[in-house]
Amino acid sequence: MEWQTLERQLGDCFFDIAAECPYGLPYKAIYRQALFGPIPDHTMDGFLAAGFRRNGNTMYTMVCRECQSCVPIRLDPEEFTPNRGQRRTLARNQDLTVTTGPLQITPDRLALCDAFLNTRYPGRHSTALDYYSGFFVNAVTNTMEVAYRLDGRLVGVAIVDVTLASLNAVYFYFDPAMSASSLGTFNILHLLELCQREDKDFLYLGYWIDAVPAMRYKARFKPHFLLRGQIWRRVDRGEPSAERP
């Protein structure tokens, strides 16, 4: 389902909200968003294909007037093969135990998420409970978590939406003390493997933002597809993601 079809069907539901840029860029962020009840899988896939993201029960896209840095990125699990560095990340994290199940809110998850937020966004006042209650938990689509443990200790959690055709990586937080282990990369590699096992067409990674160092790593997964001008443009190995059409 293309955005033009969604816009015709749901355009009156959306409104624009101005806010501080969540990624720290010096521009006013404009969210085009709407609050929803349960969304059928085919409609959710249409939203994802049109570059929308989920925040709680809200679907949104960025329409910032001064900045176009937020570029939706997705992967085709059947086409992807890991590069040398990604293979090293897989080998480095073979001692992790990975479990998949329903979203849980537990003391160890909240403590880990708070530690991550305090390191990634120092000075902000959002807490793990805020993120879970206002961002992760929803009633619009199916959501699961992927939990990563080292010797029984929780070290990473991925929040992932599940449709018939896709996995949507909503958020990933991890133990800041394990930054050298490249858990963000390992998480994406695991989700790609899960997509292959479950016969999913796409893995959506949210936004690739070249101007934000913490968001650049997503472009290292190639081939990938970037949504520009409502067209998903393929980027192969050897091609720079920053190149504009």
Image (cartoon, helix red, strand yellow):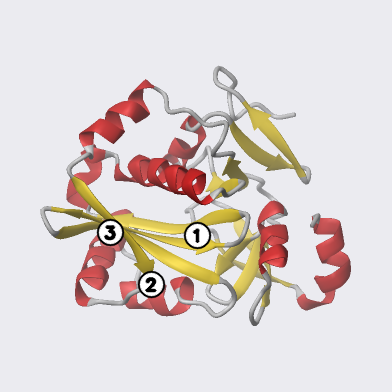
Which marked residue is nearer to the observer: mark 2 or mark 1?
A: 2
> Would you identify the image quadrant in which residue 65 lies?
bottom right
Residue for badge 2: 103
Bin the neighbour count of mark 2 within 10 Å (Cα to Cα): few under 14, some 14-19, many 20 and up. Answer: some
| Residue 1 shows in the view | yes
The label on residue 22 is 1
Choose the circle earlier in sequence order: 2 or 3: 2
Choose the circle earlier in sequence order: 1 or 3: 1
Left or right, 13 with reference to 211: right
Q: Quadrant of the N terminus?
A: bottom right
Which marked residue is nearer to the observer: mark 1 or mark 3?
A: 3
Left or right, 28 with reference to 142: right
Q: Residue shown at 54%/56% (left/top)?
A: 168
Give the camera-side residue of 243 and 79: 79
Tell me the SS state at disc 1: loop
Left or right, 19 with reference to 123: right
179 vs 154: above or below: above
Left or right, 231 with reference to 85: right
Q: Alpha carbon of mark 2 to alpha carbon of mark 1: how far?
A: 24 Å
Bin the neighbour count of mark 1 within 10 Å (Cα to Cα): few under 14, some 14-19, many 20 and up. Answer: few
Q: Position of residue 26 (x, y in %)?
A: 54, 51
Q: Position of residue 49 (x, y in %)?
A: 70, 52
Q: Amino acid at mark 1?
A: Pro
